[in-house]
Amino acid sequence: METTNFFSNVAALNITGDLQLTIRKGAENNWIVSVMLNNEQCGDDARKLIPPLNLRGTTDELDNGFFERIATPMQIASGLMVDMEGFMKQVEEAKKQSAMEKEKADRERKEKEAKEKKYKEAMQKVDELEKEGKYRDAWMKVPDPTEYPEQAEAIRKRKSALSAKFAPDLFGGTSTAVANEEPQREDIDAEQETDPEEVPELSEDDN
């Protein structure tokens, strides 16, 4: 049996995809061979626009020049579709990354809005308590500056202003304690002012 190098030559093309051959007999002694490369892994439909390569010739002409004629076009088509595939994968990855970035941005925006809302509500409560004269309660309701670094300076000033309004009672009834001690000091002073020598002596008649 005669050995051909057909498949060895196909392998030597080093192409990616399915090599499709359509062979039909033409006029006189000519043959028409249609060669098309298809790569199903390529997700770009533009690959379908690549036309088949048509060769026409006698059997001898095709035997001698077939692979020489198809090598360059098929390799170009193969590389093009591989590039298309890579491009499409990059496009999909870009879309994915874009969606992830958008989702991340939306999440950060919602978190920021929720945080700002929480801060405003807390400060509104502080305002209400301050108007009611409940300075200590208002001071305790002021947000932690570490949780709101952007408003840290305003928070510190607000807490300082509120603490100044109830500072005398900050350690628990200091003013009251001082007030209670005053009468005791007055009694002691009164006793010290009384001189025993000034006590009137009893007369004989009183005995």
Image (spheres, rainbow, N blue to C red):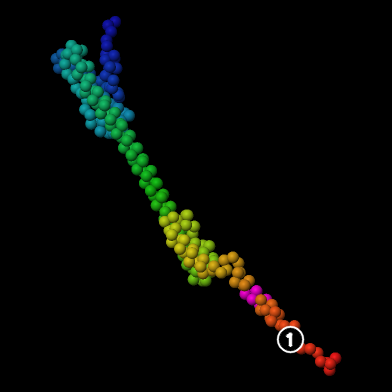
Q: Nearer the viewer, residue 124 or 107?
A: 124
Residue 144 in the image: above or below residue 205 = above
Q: Nearer the viewer, residue 143 or 18?
A: 143
> Quadrant location of the N terminus?
top left
Residue 76 position, x and y percent, is 23, 25
Residue 90 position, x and y percent, is 32, 35
Q: Amino acid at mark 1?
A: Glu
Residue farthest to the front, as pictured: 197
Q: Which residue lies at the image location 54% right of the left edge and 67% below the top edge?
A: 167
Disc 1: which residue: 198
Could you classify mark 1 by the number of other residues whose Cα lies within 10 Å: few (under 14), some (14-19), or many (20 or more)?
A: few
What span is colored magenta in the figure? 179-184
Residue farthest to the top, as pictured: 1
Residue 121 visible in the shown view:
no
Residue farthest to the right, as pictured: 207
Occupied quadrant, residue 10: top left
Residue 119 visible in the shown view:
yes
Residue 78 in the image: above or below residue 159 = above
> Quadrant location of the C terminus?
bottom right
